Every structure is written in structure tokens, then in C-alpha cells.
Image (tube, rainbow, N blue to C red):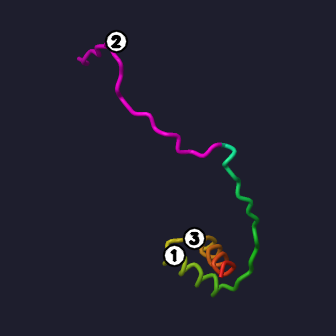
């Protein structure tokens, strides 16, 4: 037999108020990105894949990171 739930008329103290951690809609900025096609030979792609795997990144993320570093320097 199931235990019967007893409801009481008392205030609930089940949580706490969390400060809003999301930015306001006006502060949200959409990143505008464009796709760039790049042709590479098989050995270069294989090296990129190996390096990306070693760093725990995707190939596109690694290439994007390298391009940004080069442009910043």
C-alpha cells in the first residue's frame, strides 16, 4: 500500500533566488561568420587531423585558431 501524502498549509522554503546570469537581449550580438573553402592535399589534411586530435579539437576549430593567431601577430 502507498504512503498517503499529507498536505500542509505552510510556506515552502525549497529554493533560493538566483540572480539573472544571462545578458539582456540588447547585449546579445550575433556573430557573423562566413564559410571559406580551402583545398588541401591528402597529406596536409591527414596532418591537420592528427594535430587536431592531439589537441582535442576539430580540424576547423584548429585552422580557425591558427588563422586568428597569425592575424593577431
Instruction: Give the alpha-carbon distance from disc 1 to disc 3, as whole Å.
Output: 7 Å
Determine the image quadrant of residue 31. bottom right
**Helix, strand, or loop for circle 1?**
helix
Say which residue label 2 marks: 9
* Residue 18, horizontal then vertical, whole percent: 46, 38
Mark before the other along the chain sequence, 3 or 2? 2
* Residue 5, horizontal then vertical, whole percent: 29, 16
Q: Is residue 45 magenta?
A: no
Pick whichever, 52 or 66, lies toward us: 66
Query: Which label number is shown at residue 58?
Result: 3
Q: Which quadrant: the C terminus? A: bottom right
Q: How many labels, in total?
A: 3
Q: Please say if 59 is above or below 30.
A: below
Instruction: Give the alpha-carbon distance from disc 3 to disc 2, as whole Å.
Output: 55 Å
* Residue 50, horizontal then vertical, whole percent: 53, 81
**Helix, strand, or loop for circle 3?**
loop
Q: Please say if 2 is above or below 68.
A: above
58 sits to left or right of 15: right
Q: Which residue lies at the image location 75% right of the left edge and 67% below the top edge? A: 35
Query: Which label number is shown at residue 53?
Result: 1
Q: Which residues are magenta?
A: 1-24
* Residue 70, horizontal then vertical, whole percent: 66, 81
Mark before the other along the chain sequence, 1 or 2? 2
Query: Do labels 1 and 3 touch, CB within 8 Å?
Result: no
Amino acid at each position: 500500500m502507498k504512503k498517503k501524502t499529507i498536505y500542509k498549509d505552510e510556506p515552502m522554503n525549497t529554493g533560493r533566488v538566483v540572480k539573472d546570469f544571462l545578458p539582456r537581449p540588447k547585449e546579445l550580438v550575433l556573430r557573423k561568420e562566413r564559410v571559406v573553402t580551402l583545398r588541401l592535399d591528402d597529406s596536409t589534411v591527414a596532418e591537420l587531423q592528427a594535430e587536431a586530435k592531439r589537441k582535442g579539437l576539430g580540424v576547423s576549430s584548429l585552422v580557425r585558431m591558427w588563422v586568428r593567431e597569425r592575424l593577431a601577430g
